[in-house]
Amino acid sequence: GKPNDHHRGENQMTITEFILLGFGDLHELKIPVFMVFLAIYIVTLTGNILIIVMVSYIHNLHNPMYFFLGNLSVLEVCYTTSVAPKMLKTLLVVQEDISFSSFLLQFYIFGSLVVAECFLLAAMSYDRDLAICKPLHYASTMTFQLCFQLAVGSWVTGFLSLVVTMPMVSRLPFCASKEIDHFFCDLTPIIKLSCGDTYMVRILAFIIASFVSFLSFLLILLSYYKIISTILKIPSISGKQKAFSTCSSHLIVMSVFYGTLMVVYAAPIANQWPNLNKIFSVLYTMVTPLINAIVYSLRNMEVKETLRKLFSKNPC
């Protein structure tokens, strides 16, 4: 039909305010869940800020691997902060009102950071690939200039990737319900609410999500195929363990992030079940940044050693 067909008829008043339902069906569990999410948020912020400070100020961490890790931590801090405060508020208040423009802003920031993370994880796996497979050429290949270009490229790609989707979403009409069954401003719940034709937005969002996740995932698989092939050729077991330990942290973070991301955005099953969608969304919005902070700061020998030196110098 024509674009204005859906404006006909009574009660077709355009809605500009929405209500985020969050975890409305938790009832008496709301406070314990709030405490758990608040603890996760605090640990995530602390761990990632610690990594940022250490990578910035400690000289022996001024290398490509930690440069990318510092970028990832900045990204994780922005990423959780774009979702967590609003999500925690939905657990405390009866209903969380949000204007359409605020909704779009949160969706844009969050979506851009997700895309940036996909490509940053790919850049990190390329760095590990070079370090393990071509150790002699590593220093001359992975220059500061290349690191900088890969990091900036990831951030810029992230913020440009939603430029096409945003105007289409902003023009969607809403006329029936204004309740969004989610804890943050994501695309699937808002598309469900629209009383207009959402076919083009859905197709475009699916293409972008699939392209970004599968392209970056493919690059990572390629790097890890080369890494594992190289590690298997190392004769000594201790050599194998040493080589593998440098990329095991990255492997854990990446598996959780991509696993949940693909379920939420590329698999239609999660969209049919709002609660399932929420569970998987919690995994990649709250749990992945937490795992990142823990895995990289606590499982990492260099970071542990640096922390030990720091605290032995400053008794306070």
Image (cartoon, helix red, strand yellow):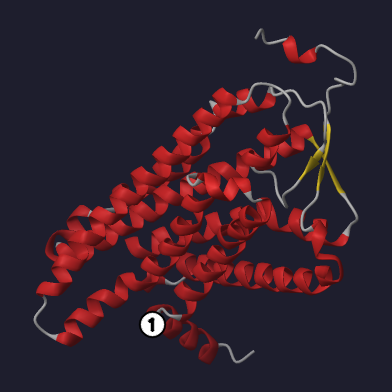
> Does 215 sit above or below residue 123?
above
Left or right: where does residue 154 sit relative to residue 268? left
At x 20%, y 53%, the residue is 141
Left or right: where does residue 132 sit relative to residue 58? left
Q: Which one is in front, 141 or 273?
A: 273
The reply to whether residue 140 is visible in this rendering is yes
> Does 19 sit above or below residue 287?
above
Say few, some or many: other residues with alpha carbon within 10 Å of mark 1 (under 14 / 14 to 19 / 20 or more): few
Left or right: where does residue 299 sit relative to residue 10? left
Q: Quadrant of the N terminus?
A: top right
At x 68%, y 35%, the residue is 192
The reply to whether residue 62 is visible in this rendering is no
> SS of the residue at dot 1?
helix
Q: Which one is in front, 45 or 110?
A: 110
Tell me which corner region of the image, top left, top right, bottom left or bottom right, holds residue 97. top right
At x 64%, y 28%, the residue is 169
Residue 182 on image: x %, y %: 72, 49
Residue 88 on image: x %, y %: 77, 61
Residue at image mark 1: 301
Q: Quadrant of the C terminus?
A: bottom right
Tell me which corner region of the image, top left, top right, bottom left or bottom right, holds residue 47. bottom right
Left or right: where does residue 40 sit relative to residue 16? left
Residue 37 on image: x %, y %: 71, 68
Q: Amino acid at mark 1?
A: Met
At x 41%, y 61%, the residue is 254
Residue 262 on image: x %, y %: 47, 51
